[in-house]
Image (cartoon, rainbow, N blue to C red):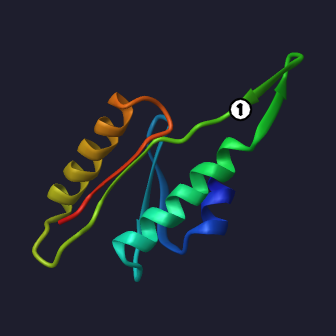
Amino acid sequence: MADQLKKRVTTSYLARFSGAEFCSVISSKSLTENRSLLEEFKKEVSLLTLDYKDRELRFTVTVGGAEMGDKTTVKKWLTQADAAYQEALTKGGGGLVIHDS
């Protein structure tokens, strides 16, 4: 999945954040462009399969993001991104929520 994200999104930072969560810093794109890229990424991941013990496993991605404004602190930015992620999870797996600044 990380390869799919790297292929689709120009990122200056991509790392495991916690457990199965990843953090990516995407710069130089508008919020609309980022949303579109992330929707395409989610679609590509949903097409991936993994054969495991005679079963075909499929994947979903839930995305929470936040736009960092000029006066946004890193702490506030990460808090907003996490809140967006939690909101996306409550709507069911495979959601996408991005909070703007």
Local crowd size for mark 1, using a 10 Å CA cut-off: few (<14), some (14–19), many (≥20): few
Q: Is residue 5 left or right of residue 99?
A: right
Q: Which residue is mark 1?
A: 58
Instruction: State the residue lying farthest toward the left.
Output: 71
Task: Name the spot of residue 94 as percent of width and height, x first.
Answer: 50, 38
Q: Is residue 76 left or right of residue 32?
A: left
Can you say which quadrant of the picture contains the C terminus?
bottom left
Q: Is residue 72 above or below residue 29?
A: above
Q: Is residue 13 above or below residue 46?
A: below
Task: Name the spot of residue 87 as percent of width and height, x first.
Answer: 29, 37
In the image shown, does 75 or 94 lie closer to the viewer?
94
In the image shown, does 72 or 55 lie closer to the viewer?
55
In the image shown, does 42 or 73 lie closer to the viewer?
42
Q: What amino acid does circle 1 point to?
A: Arg
Instruction: State the residue lying farthest toward the bottom.
Output: 28
Q: Is residue 84 left or right of residue 32?
A: left
Residue 1 in view: no
Q: Is residue 4 left or right of residue 60?
A: right
Q: Is residue 55 above or below residue 101?
A: above
> Residue, x 44% and y 68% (percent of image)?
34
Residue 98 in view: yes
Task: Name the spot of residue 45 as percent of width and height, x first.
Answer: 66, 47
> Residue, x 18% and y 73% (percent of image)?
69
Q: Is residue 75 above or below residue 54?
A: below
Residue 27, by quadrant, is bottom left
> Residue, x 62% and y 54% (percent of image)?
2
As helix, strand or loop, the secondary structure at mark 1 comes to strand
* Number of numbered discs overlaid on the protein picture: 1
> Residue, x 58% and y 50% (percent of image)?
42
